[in-house]
Amino acid sequence: MRSNEIVDTMRRSLNGIGMELIVGRRMNLKEILQNEMSSAADNIVVVVRGASGMVDKARAAVVDMGRIGSEKVITLVGESFSW
């Protein structure tokens, strides 16, 4: 997120939904997916929308998690754009 105003708005809009907002640094997608896979009781849906490079990194992280092998299904929904 680029500004705290956006963060505050998102927190209010998504109240009650499990989420993590990260400001000032990039997310570690592999770590986040590993944590979600280990704690999820059911299948997982990863939704990513952003620059094509970010969507590609998310796709690679999802593929890596799928290669590890799991009973859970990971579904990726991605939308990319350019500036």
Image (tube, grey):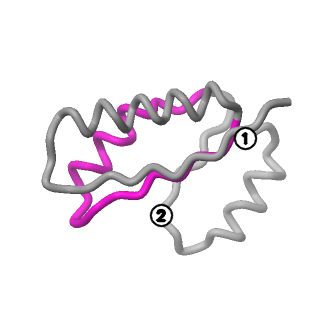
Quarter of the rendering containing residue 30: top left
**Magenta-drawn segment:** 26-50
Considering only vertical position in the picture, is 26 above or below 46?
A: above
Describe the element under mark 1 as helix, strand or loop: loop
Describe the element under mark 2 as helix, strand or loop: loop
Q: Which residue is mark 1?
A: 1
Q: Nearer the viewer, residue 74 or 22?
A: 74
Q: Which amino acid, by three-letter code, is at mark 2?
A: Gly
- Label 2 crowd (10 A; few <14 / some 14-19 / many >=20): few
Say which label, 2 or 1, has the lower sequence index. Answer: 1
The residue shown at (21%, 49%) is 38
Q: Which amino acid, by three-letter code, is at mark 1?
A: Met
Whole-percent x, y for residue 8 in the image: 75, 58
Considering only vertical position in the picture, is 21 above or below 30?
A: below
Q: CA distance from mark 2 to mark 1?
A: 17 Å
Whole-percent x, y for residue 80 in the image: 68, 39
